[in-house]
Image (cartoon, rainbow, N blue to C red):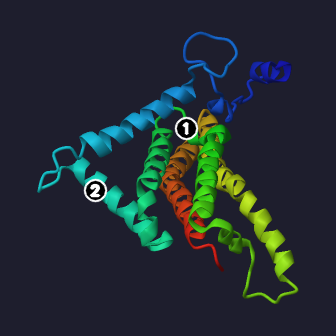
Amino acid sequence: MATETHGAEEGGLVFHPMDQFIVEPLFGEGAVGFFTVTNVTLWMAIAVLAVIVLMVLGTSRRAVIPSRTQSIAELAYGFVYKMVEDVAGKDAVAFFPYIMTLFMFIVFANFLGLIPMSFTTTSHFAVTVVLALMVFVTVTIVGFVKNGARFLELFWVKSAPLALRPILAIIELISYFVRPVSHSIRLAGNVMAGHAVIKVFAGFAAIAVISPVSVVAITAMYGLEVLVAFIQAYVFTILTCVYLKDALHPSH
């Protein structure tokens, strides 16, 4: 703290790109407890409300000539439905509501996080880990319920030479339990990195000499983050479909 204060007194540039990810109580001050309403709570609730407005209220009339809201809702519905059917198979369509909910929540949370002064909930591992663990537990339960002990065939590579199968089984088992880790880190890491870079460029915008360059860089990064917001929701969802396919059809 002393170093930061000294730097500010010397006229240096002081900014903290990671401060935007700090979880703070929404009411009052103090430590954040298990039941504390925080900025994360607020923006997760806003994301859920936005999904409800789009998917429920926006399609309640179902006009022959759809409104813009209805068109967006129908496009999202068709996009995710086809993804589930193409990747996981027709028997995975029963899980479409769950996968659709995941996609819509993540994509809205990502886009809402791009609003100035907002909070990006998907930049926190506490959020993405829970989402990934929900997928992991769901597909594992589905795998055993639908296939019984045959679900273990997922880890037994029958096409490989017999001598290599035990080694490959260990590798497959490890990779299976690593899934929720990679699934959650990929989403949170990409979202956090992009927002941090934008914050860094915004800090340099205070310097008059390089301010025009910083503004151009911020604009370019913001445009890229809009694309990343959708892509990361898509990647999380399509990986969920892949994992579901393994649960429904475990044999190699």
**Could you tell me which quadrant the N terminus lies in?**
top right
Residue at the image position 44 percent from the left and 48 percent from the top: 101
User: At 63% across and 54% down in the image, what residue appears?
Assistant: 136
Q: Nearer the viewer, residue 229 or 6?
A: 229
In the image shown, does 7 or 247 lie closer to the viewer?
247
Residue under label 2: 74
Residue 177: x, y in percent? 74, 58
Q: Give percent across and percent down for residue 77.
A: 34, 57
The one nearer the camera, 84 or 121, is 84
- As helix, strand or loop, the secondary structure at mark 2 comes to helix
Q: Amino acid at mark 2?
A: Glu
- Depth check, mark 1 against mark 2: the one in front is 2
Describe residue 188's horizontal placement relative to residue 11 as left or right.
left
Residue depicted at 30% across the width and 52% down the height: 73
From the viewer's perspective, is 186 left or right of 219? Answer: right
Please report whichever mark, 1 or 2, sits nearer to the chain's N-terminal start: 2
Crowding around mark 1 (Cα neighbors within 10 Å: few <14, some 14 to 19, many 20+) is many
Name which residue type carries label 1.
Answer: Thr
Crowd tier of the residue under label 2, counting other residues whose Cα lies within 10 Å: few below 14, some 14–19, many 20 or above:
some
Residue 191 shows in this picture:
yes
Q: Is residue 188 above or below residue 94?
A: above
Residue drawn 17% across the image and 50% down it: 62
* Image position of 163 (left or right of 240): right
How far apart are labels 1 and 2 at the CA level? 26 Å
- Element on which disc 1 rests: loop
Q: Quadrant of the C terminus?
A: bottom right
Q: Is residue 89 above or below residue 23?
A: below
Q: Which residue is mark 1?
A: 120
Q: Residue furthest left?
A: 64
